[in-house]
Amino acid sequence: MMRRSKVLNKLRSGGFANCFKVNIPDPRVAEIVALSGFDCVWLDQEHIGQDWSVMAASIWATKSQDADIMVRIARGGYSDYVRPLELDATGIMVPHVMGVDDARKVIEMTRFHPQGRRALDGGNNDAAYTMMDFHDYIKTANRERFIVLQIEDPEPMEEVEEIAALDGFDVLFFGPGDFSQGIGHPGEWDHPRIVDARKRIAEVAHQYGKFAGTVGSPANLEELKTMGYDFVSAGADVIGLAQYCREIRTAFGSDPEKESKGGYFEG
């Protein structure tokens, strides 16, 4: 009774999974992205803090179009980790994993026995409101719901191999934006330490049977695939809307005082 993960099915079959980030807290935006054919819709709680009822509606809207939905959680108490899963999000991303001990705690909070000790209820959407067999629920949730650990700081690189070796998570995800800040070179995407970290994360992920994820763009998708990345998020609703508005505005004539190059967006 628990829907299979499209992302995990593709990755476990040796395929490539795509994702698109949604910043605007409106279920219709998530539905439009899913209707467009993306494998996964990425919602954000870390930087946006969406109302839970809006998030629930976005999950329903995405599921209705047979797409996965991943929620990047806010790093608070354990409820912040499990509530998206109980609303039947297909996966969660945990930002700023700072080391192997941190990663172990995440797994303990987000996986059921025998991998962890996730808080158990069973009365929500993911367990069909108690209509799913108890043992099937635990087993299927561990198999069909994915956990993404985001490495976006230089500190955990010292333990990245130990992190990758842990059981109980699926994707090791590189975030270059905060990493560039952490090394003191914000926005220098070709800095050798960023290039090395991007390559290293893909290597150790596959070495220990995990999948490698990161953010990208249509321009570097093939490069990331060659590097070993199998799960890439490219694009976001706010970028598309901003670009579209600028294109329409320029049809009326540009206004030098309002010209802007735009800001950074990692996702």
Image (tube, helix red, strand yellow):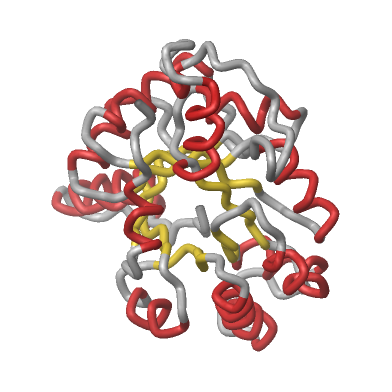
Q: Is residue 183 above or below residue 135?
A: below
At 25% from the left edge and 40% from the top edge, which residue is drawn? 34
- Toward the bottom, the furthest residue is 192
Q: In x, y percent, where is residue 144? A: 45, 42
User: Picture coordinates of residue 57 (x, y %)?
Assistant: 37, 19
* Residue 106 found in image quarter: top right
Taking the spot 48% from the left edge, 29% from the top edge, the residue there is: 136
Q: Residue furthest right?
A: 101
Left or right: residue 263 versus residue 120 is: left
User: Residue visible at 45% across and 32% down?
Assistant: 89
Q: Looking at the rendering, which quadrant does residue 177 occupy?
A: bottom right
Task: Give 103 or 121, whichever is nearer the viewer.
Answer: 121
Q: Is residue 41 left or right of residue 72?
A: left
Q: Position of residue 26 (x, y in %)?
A: 36, 25
In the picture, the quarter occupied by the N terminus is: top left
Question: Where does the image place residue 206, in percent across and percent down from the top left?
Answer: 55, 75
Please tell me which residue lies in front, 176 or 253.
Answer: 176
Q: Nearer the viewer, residue 137 or 14?
A: 137
For image coordinates 63% across by 54% down, the residue present is: 149
Q: Going by the picture, which residue comes out furthest to the left?
A: 251
Quadrant position of residue 132: top left
